[in-house]
């Protein structure tokens, strides 16, 4: 029904930057909140940043001032600009979106995850 495709992960040195993208496609009527989560194997998935359909944002304290979430509603895409990366930012990052389908059902959709590795 809905697919979220992430891109932009990779390997970067500490202090560097990466930009993650997540594009949604499928039977979309509208996309509500969107967000980025991260998860180290064996640990709980953590919300990194979220953005409402009106553009209001919130961040986990550890990334405030370094990461910026944004979205392009015309492209059904959410971005995560990550600056001043630290080794502790190393994780698999997942995109999430609350999507109202053309059937008017609302679902929570997840991307497949993209690896971000920050070397010291």
Image (tube, rainbow, N blue to C red):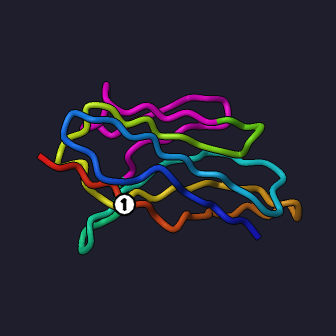
Residue at left offset 38%, top offset 40%: 18
Q: Quadrant of residue 45?
A: bottom left
Vertical placement of residue 12 versus 69, above or below: below
Q: Quadrant of residue 97?
A: bottom right
Residue at left offset 55%, top offset 63%: 111
Residue 56 placement, left or right of 92? right
Q: Position of residue 63 (x, y in %)?
A: 29, 36
Residue 12 placement, left or right of 109? left
Q: Is residue 40 magenta?
A: no
- Of the pair 72 and 8, the residue shown nearer to us: 8
Q: Position of residue 12 (x, y in %)?
A: 27, 46
Residue at left offset 81%, top offset 56%: 28
Q: Position of residue 67 (x, y in %)?
A: 37, 33
Residue 8 placement, left or right of 98? left
Q: Residues within 10 Å of mark 1 (few under 14, many from 20)?
A: some
Q: Quadrant of residue 56?
A: top right
Vertical placement of residue 101 versus 81, above or below: below
* SS at circle 1: strand
Please identify the quadrant where the N terminus is shown: bottom right
Vertical placement of residue 36 versus 79, above or below: below
Q: Position of residue 82 (x, y in %)?
A: 37, 37
> Range of the magenta residues?
47-71
Residue identified by numbered label 1: 115
């Amino acid at each position: 029904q809905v697919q979220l495709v992430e891109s932009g992960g990779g390997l970067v040195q500490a202090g560097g930057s990466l930009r993650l993208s997540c594009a949604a496609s499928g039977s979309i009527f509208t996309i509500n909140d969107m967000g980025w989560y991260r998860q180290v194997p064996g640990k709980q998935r953590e919300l990194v940043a979220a953005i409402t359909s009106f553009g209001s944002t919130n961040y986990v304290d550890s990334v405030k001032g370094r990461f910026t979430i944004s979205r392009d509603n015309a492209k059904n895409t959410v971005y995560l600009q990550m600056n001043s990366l630290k080794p502790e930012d190393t994780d698999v990052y997942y995109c999430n979106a609350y999507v109202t389908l053309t059937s008017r059902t609302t679902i929570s959709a997840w991307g497949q995850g993209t690896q971000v590795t920050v070397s010291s």
